[in-house]
Image (cartoon, rainbow, N blue to C red):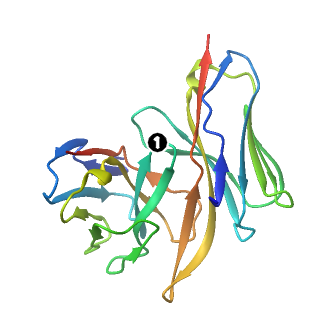
């Protein structure tokens, strides 16, 4: 079983729709929860992050974390064609490996989103 | 600011050959990472480095090696490439090992034939 599960989609919506992207996870030790956006043939870029249960808003984007259910979501309001990309959830914890600690980022598989005009 | 620069952008490599993927960052970040991205599997960590002079193994380190001689550079070497190493490789960096935001390069598309 993967530590982080994300529906790969693809998801196709009309412009202006509300988009809901979701991830579930199994490791309760995860401390930080992030959403990355990746345009075609580009590297991922951080969209939002949070470290507690609840909602966090940034413009048209809302990140939601429910630690009790081990479930995170990203909502996009008034979606635009420029939002078309792959969205990756990621989770972070501090890991000890052979006496050395490092911040391990575990990614979901990514959801391909297309917003058509 | 360039951020993270990866080279080459893409490469076709014969099986059994060696290759080094280059990664340079100009943000003076301490932590650097190498990931591979495969369809349906997402991003998987190959190797990491918390600071210059130290490296560690990630989830899928077999067949790869890294070095971190200085803060800016973190090359990834494939000693003897195999077709299963066909992937898109991303280098990333963070200010500190436990920081949240990882900055990614543009990726190197590698095909091993």
Q: Nearer the viewer, residue B104 or B20?
A: B20
Left or right, residue B31 beside residue B98: left
Q: Give coordinates of residue A15: x percent, y percent.
A: 68, 15
User: Within 10 Å of the Cα at label 1, are there few (<14), some (14-19), or many (20+) other Cα atoms?
Assistant: few
Quadrant position of the C terminus of chain A in the picture:
top right
Which residue lies under the disc numbered 1?
Answer: B39
Residue at point 21% right, 58% down?
B81
Q: Position of residue A75 (x, y in %)?
A: 75, 35
Query: Which residue is nearer to you in this view: B111 or A88?
Result: B111
Report if residue B29 is visible in the image: no
Vertical placement of residue A15 versus B70, above or below? above
Q: Chain of mark 1?
A: B
Residue B59 pos. (x, y %): 47, 67
**Residue A56 visible, this angle:** yes
Q: Quadrant of residue A110?
A: top right
The residue lying at 57 percent from left, 60 percent from top is A106
Residue at the far top in the pictured view: A117
- In the displayed structure, does residue B67 sit left or right of residue A2? left
User: Number of marks in the image?
Assistant: 1
Q: Is residue A44 left or right of residue B24?
A: right
Q: Quadrant of residue B63?
A: bottom left
Q: Indicate the secondary structure of the residue bearing disc 1.
A: loop
């Amino acid at each position: 079983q993967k530590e982080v599960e994300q529906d790969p989609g693809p998801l196709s919506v009309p412009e202006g729709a509300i988009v809901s992207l979701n991830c579930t996870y199994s490791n309760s030790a995860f401390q930080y929860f992030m959403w990355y956006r990746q345009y075609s043939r580009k590297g991922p870029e951080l969209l939002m992050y949070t470290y507690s249960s609840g909602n966090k808003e940034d413009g048209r984007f809302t990140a939601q974390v429910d630690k009790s259910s081990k479930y995170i979501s990203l909502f996009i309001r008034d979606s635009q064609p420029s939002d078309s990309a792959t969205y990756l959830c990621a989770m972070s914890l501090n890991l000890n490996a052979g006496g050395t600690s490092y911040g391990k980022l575990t990614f979901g598989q990514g959801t391909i989103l297309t917003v058509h005009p | 600011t360039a951020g993270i620069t990866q080279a080459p952008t893409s490469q076709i490599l014969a099986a059994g050959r060696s290759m080094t993927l280059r990664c340079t960052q100009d943000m003076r970040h301490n932590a650097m990472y190498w990931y591979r991205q495969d369809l349906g599997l997402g991003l998987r960590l190959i190797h990491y480095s918390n600071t210059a002079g130290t490296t560690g193994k990630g989830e899928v380190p077999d067949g790869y090696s890294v070095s971190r001689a200085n803060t800016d550079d973190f090359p990834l070497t494939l000693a003897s490439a195999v077709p299963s190493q066909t992937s898109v490789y991303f280098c990333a960096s963070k200010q500190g090992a436990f920081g949240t935001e990882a900055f990614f390069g543009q990726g190197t598309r590698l095909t091993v034939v």
